[in-house]
Image: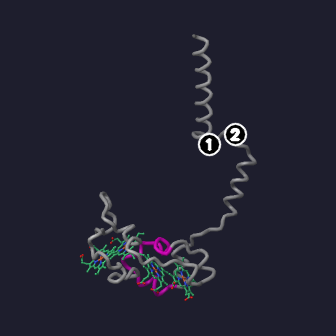
Amino acid sequence: MKGKTIVLGVIFGVIVYLILFTYVFGFSPFVTGSSQSKWIELELSREPKFSDTAICKECHYQLYTGMKNHSSVNCEACHGPGAEHTIKRSKDTIEINRSRDACLRCHMEIAGRNAVKVVNESHSTGILCVVCHNPHE
Ligand code: HEC
Ligand code: HEC
Ligand code: HEC
Ligand code: HEC
């Protein structure tokens, strides 16, 4: 009985040791140098999808300077990733979402949300928000 307890104790100790070293100290006997460099290589090979408002501004300057309400909101928060568009400059490389849901993502009344002005579903139900509100004003 005592021998079995000791064996179980040692197995438990080894498991704790592996978890600690893998997740707490970021070091694992299973992660070798080569798999780490392969991971870094893979990450570096990914094309960036997002650009930045500072870049959108270069070509859409008038629109950018006219913004007040949404001047703190990144263009790509509404228009989605725009890195490809900044190079191709075409309509099909950028998204325009006019749905109510696209606005309610940030403006829907939710308990605890108080950083932005909120409305609820009954606020002009059935009419697109952009009919009354210009998102670039
Ligand atoms: C290098 C210049 C350039 C940059 C940078 C640029 N755009 Fe554009 N954008 C254009 C041009 C040109 C058009 C008009 C395309 C057309 O009419 O065919 C356009 C059109 C658009 C449209 C309208 C698409 C439509 O369906 O009518 C949106 C939305 C847009 N851009 C958003 C952005 C955002 C967001 C960024 C930043 C991530 C950005 N643009 C950066 C040149 C640029
Ligand atoms: C709050 C969400 C939101 C933000 C932030 C936003 N847009 Fe828009 N954008 C829209 C919507 C919605 C439309 C479609 C408007 C309509 O049809 O009435 C649109 C339309 C456009 C258009 C094409 C029509 C037009 O009005 O000229 C361009 C270009 C554009 N946006 C560029 C930008 C750029 C550049 C930025 C950042 C400086 C930006 N948008 C920030 C939501 C947004
Ligand atoms: C990524 C989050 C985000 C999205 C998406 C968004 N907004 Fe906003 N909106 C903000 C922020 C931040 C402000 C500025 C803080 C405030 O006044 O609530 C703002 C302000 C506003 C205001 C001014 C409120 C006031 O009276 O002060 C209106 C109106 C508005 N947004 C309408 C819209 C519409 C319409 C859409 C969809 C096209 C939209 N928003 C999408 C974040 C967002
Ligand atoms: C029929 C026109 C109309 C439509 C559609 C509409 N709104 Fe409004 N909205 C208004 C008017 C008018 C006000 C200002 C009067 C008020 O505060 O009620 C307002 C106020 C707001 C405010 C500021 C609220 C505050 O506390 O000051 C926000 C945010 C807003 N709307 C977001 C939206 C969003 C998001 C949508 C779409 C889901 C939308 N609106 C659809 C007319 C409209």
- Whether 95 is among the magenta residues is no
Above or below, 101 against 9 in this view is: below
Residue plotted at (61% across, 21% down) = 10
* Amino acid type of the residue tagged 1 in the rendering: Gly
Q: Picture coordinates of residue 26 (x, y %)?
A: 62, 42
Query: Which residue is under mark 1?
Result: 26
Q: Is residue 71 magenta?
A: yes
Residue 93 falls left or right of residue 66: right
Q: Neighbour class for label 2 at 10 Å: few (<14), some, many (≥20)?
A: few
The residue lying at 29 percent from left, 75 percent from top is: 125
Q: Is residue 124 left or right of residue 47?
A: left
Quadrant of picture, ligand 2: bottom left
Q: Secondary structure at mark 1?
A: loop
Residue contact between numbered discs 1 and 2, judged by CB atoms under 8 Å:
no
What residue did someone put label 2 on?
Answer: 30
Quadrant for the C terminus, please.
bottom left
Q: Nearer the viewer, residue 111 or 74?
A: 111
* Residue 74 picture location, percent across and down: 47, 72
Q: Give the number of the mark in front: 1 or 2.
A: 2
Q: Which segment did they paint magenta?
A: 60-79
Is 67 drawn above or below residue 23 in the view shown? Answer: below
- Residue 2 placed where, x, y %? 58, 10
Q: Residues within 10 Å of mark 1 (few under 14, many from 20)?
A: few
Q: Amino acid at mark 2?
A: Phe
* 98 horizontally vs 15: left or right: left
